[in-house]
Image: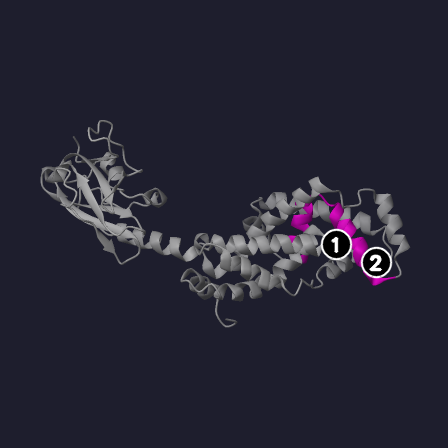
Amino acid sequence: MSDRGDKLDRAIDLLKEPVTLDASFDTRVMSEVESAPSPRIWTQRVWTAIDWMTRGRTVTVSPLAGAAVAVGVAMVLLTGRNWISQDTTEPTGLAELAGVQFVIIAPAATSVSLVGDFNDWATSATPMQPVEGNGVWSVTVPLSAGRYRYAFLVNGDTWLSDPSAPPVLDDEFGRPGSVLTIGEL
Amino acid sequence: MKGESDGVLVRRVLGGDTEAYAGLVDRYRDRLAHYAVRMLGNTADAEEALQDAFVRGYRSLARCTDPERYGAWLFGILVNRCRTTGARRARRERLIVSDEAALANASVEHTESRDAVREAIGRAVAQLPPAQREAFLLKHVEGLSYDEMTRVTGAKVSALKMRVARACEVLRRLLNEVDGV
């Protein structure tokens, strides 16, 4: 016999009896589920982007650059992972050219260009390439140590800055921009 | 779908196969409905809370970090939805019998039928404070361990044990007034 007592035990047994829901319950749930946004799209894009960005890097960057390289309108979702290699053991390489990868998530874009003072703000000099057709665009640019201003040009007419990077405070062109710092200046 | 694990079904849904979610609904509907009905005291509120939990579970499926334990993860969502539904209902109307004498009188009037006994037990459970009712049902009716209860409720084991003990004490006293149990 349980130490809870007979009446309580019998009550628990009755409370364990099965319950019955309306026969249309499953249909109602699935109807609402099918009209809800699919969790698939967000998941695939983010995990593809995380996987892509967590691959090894050869770039040596300053802490500020670590934030600045996190380029992309959706990158704010991808914090919390050490996705870029910050090798501070070889400072002599800072003056040398290094490949810096820029990323932007722009699923509706038909073209994206990386534009900055490193390419004299030429709008077609550095086109970005789609990654596996899932809305992620990327390009790798050889850059030496220094401070750079940049922006993204989407579909040839829409300028986007990087929300996860410091903004340009003195943009003489009046368009959005961000700051990338490579090396310890 | 019946032979597929939770993890397989979750991955199918995340892969775009929305219909696979029906397998998860079918698998956990009865178990979760049981808790919701006992917690909220009526089928209508329970269905509302459970449907909300399933839909929220679908929308948030990418945040289910252990797809093989989807059921436990969803149970946590349901517990929260029941809290919300219960609190909203408490503000809307007072359904429970708060007077022990009224409970005893009501039970005496209906002791001849088993349905009346169930009704009396339901009233007694409904008199428990929500946190005690939640802990009591999870432990003694749903059969969860205290570790599982901690994951589902967010409360510490010591607090849960205290709530269960107090709930049993109150129920034992209330049920002593009910004939036929």
Q: Nearer the viewer, mark 1 or mark 2?
A: 2
Q: Chain of mark 2?
A: B
Vertical relation: A3 (above or below) B170: below
Asked if residue A104 lies in the magenta stretch, the reply is: no
Read off the magenta span. B113-141
- Quadrant for the C terminus of chain B in the image: bottom right
Number of other residues with Cα within 10 Å of mark 2, as a class: few under 14, some 14 to 19, many 20 or more: many
Q: Depth check: give the residue in front, A99 or B51.
A: B51
Horizontally, residue A3 falls left or right of residue B88, namely: right
Colour setup of the view: one colour
Residue at image mark 2: B116
Magenta residues: mostly which secondary structure?
helix
Vertical relation: A33 (above or below) B169: below
- Mark 1–mark 2 Cα distance, whole angstroms, equals 22 Å
Vertical relation: A165 (above or below) A113: above
At 31% from the left and 43% from the top, the residue drawn is: A73
Q: Amino acid at mark 1?
A: Arg
At 83% from the left and 44% from the top, the residue drawn is: B100
Q: Which mark is residue A117?
A: none
Residue B151: x, y in percent?
Answer: 54, 50
Q: Amino acid at mark 2?
A: Ala
Secondary element at image label 1: loop
Residue A104: x, y in percent?
Answer: 27, 46
Q: Are marks 1 and 2 on the same chain?
A: no
Q: Which mark is residue A4?
A: 1
Residue A65: x, y in percent?
Answer: 22, 37
Asked if residue B136 lies in the magenta stretch, the reply is: yes
Residue B116: x, y in percent?
Answer: 83, 58
At 31% from the left and 38% from the top, the residue drawn is: A163
Secondary element at image label 2: helix
